[in-house]
Image: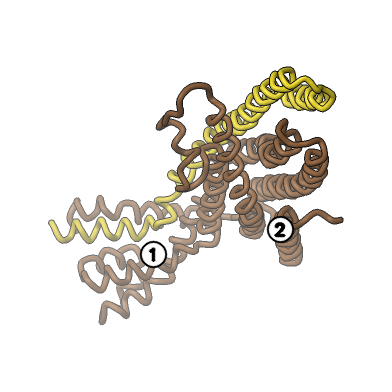
Chain colours: A brown, B yellow
Amino acid sequence: MTARHSGNFAFLALVLALSTLAGGCTNVPTAEIKVFRESVVAANTAATPVLDEVSANERKIKQAVIDARPGEPDFRPAEAGYFSDIGDAPGTAMIRRAHNVLDRFSDVLLGLATGSNVDSDISGLEGLVKESTGLLSIVTDFVPAAGTAAASIQGAFAIAKPGLKLVANELSHREARRVIQMAVDNRIVENLTRSLVDASPAMFNLLVQDAFNSATDENSSAEIRRVAQKAYIDRTRKVRLLMANYVILVQRMNAAWDEAARASAEKTTISVTVLTDRISELRAAAIATRKAYVDLHMSPAK
Amino acid sequence: MPEQDRQTIAAAIRAALDVLDATTDEARKKNIRDSIKAMRTQMNDMVVSDLSSSAAALATASAEMQKVINNAQPHLDGQILQAARDAKAALGTA
């Protein structure tokens, strides 16, 4: 093997050495990460229609502000997001992005914890080996048992495969733990979920503002305003329930994260029964929030 | 926007509506309507600005999390596979 080849595969050698020195598998709280992932999915599922509503209201209220501006109508590029029907209104877009980032974070972490990438990695490696016998000799250098089955490329790789898979899994688990530690050190989940909760009063106010405007329309008669006031009160109750469910889901997401981080630090894990129960609870909470959203658009009770 | 400010404007609008309902003088009614309209615009602007402020805090927190994702992503994409690709490329050019 040339120095160049050695350099390219130094990484693999290092991985094998690390795995051997570790003397076993790295503990990863996979069950807790699954609950965290489920809690993120539940919160995002519940948030989607809420954010659609917030976006529509953000545009409507901002347009009213712009329409009330004195002078001749104008167009300001900085305000395009409040008029365009492409994507969300500016403020809502940032809230939705926070949910999307959380979704990606939990997905990447679960992928690392469960080694979901490992099988495709090994398949990819097998494909590369089939294309290059030189590469096979490098791979088998690191998995000595494979050297004895040099009769065919496929035979040699079949023997090398379990060892490579172990190494890939170990690497994936180590990375999961590193990501958890990095997230704990920088409090990234805590900061993001707290910011989402902090944004909820602004979302509430925006969601009821249009109804408030109707209830206090100076051009309507007192009688019409009284009817609109009832609708406003009804909407505030429904929006309060909707936002309360949303906030609870976001807080559960943070609690699930805390549990995953604690389990990673203490090398503990929850049972399958507890895991199933937690996931069922989260799904039920997401359904309750969706129901609250549907109720928001139903006529008030007579 | 402090919630107190929103509540104060809402109370002022409602008080102005009570005066409007009790007024018969058309010129005075117009003044009151203009005043309510100005207060409503101020309240609308506050509500939208408040969401923008909250969203700005979220953008910072999202960016921090994105950094961690970007850092972890290459690992999820497969270090072993990438190393093999590099090795194969090197074999091809050696």
What's the residue type where badge 2 is placed?
Val
**In the depicted view, which residue is nearer to us: A62 or A225?**
A225
The dot on residue A294 is 2
Image height of B12 relative to A176, above or below: above
Task: Provide residue A25's location: percent of width, then percent of height.
Answer: 55, 59
Residue A255 seen in this snapshot: no
| Other-residue count near label 1 (Cα within 10 Å), few / some / many at <14 / 14–19 / ≥20 | many
Residue furthest to the left: B94
Q: Residue A147's quadrant in the figure? A: bottom left
Helix, strand or loop status at disc 2 = helix
Closer to the eye: label 2 or 1: 2
| Other-residue count near label 2 (Cα within 10 Å), few / some / many at <14 / 14–19 / ≥20 | few
Q: What residue would you read off at disc 1?
A: A121
Residue A187 lies left or right of residue A20; in this view the side is right
Q: Residue A155's quadrant in the figure? A: bottom left
State how many labels appear: 2
**In the depicted view, which residue is nearer to us: A295 or A1?**
A295
- Marks 2 and 1 sit apart, C-alpha to C-alpha, by 43 Å
Helix, strand or loop status at disc 1 = helix
Task: Provide residue A138's location: percent of width, then percent of height.
Answer: 26, 63
- Chain on which label 1 sits: A
The dot on residue A70 is none
Task: Provide residue A1's location: percent of width, then percent of height.
Answer: 19, 59
Q: Residue at x 81, y 44 (%)?
A: A227
Residue furthest to the right: A302
Q: Quadrant of the C terminus of chain A?
A: bottom right
Q: Residue at x 32, y 57 (%)?
A: B82
- Chain on which label 2 sits: A
Q: Which residue is drawn at 66% across and 47% down?
A: A257
Residue A172 lies left or right of residue A187; in this view the side is left
**In the depicted view, which residue is nearer to us: A251 or A46?**
A46
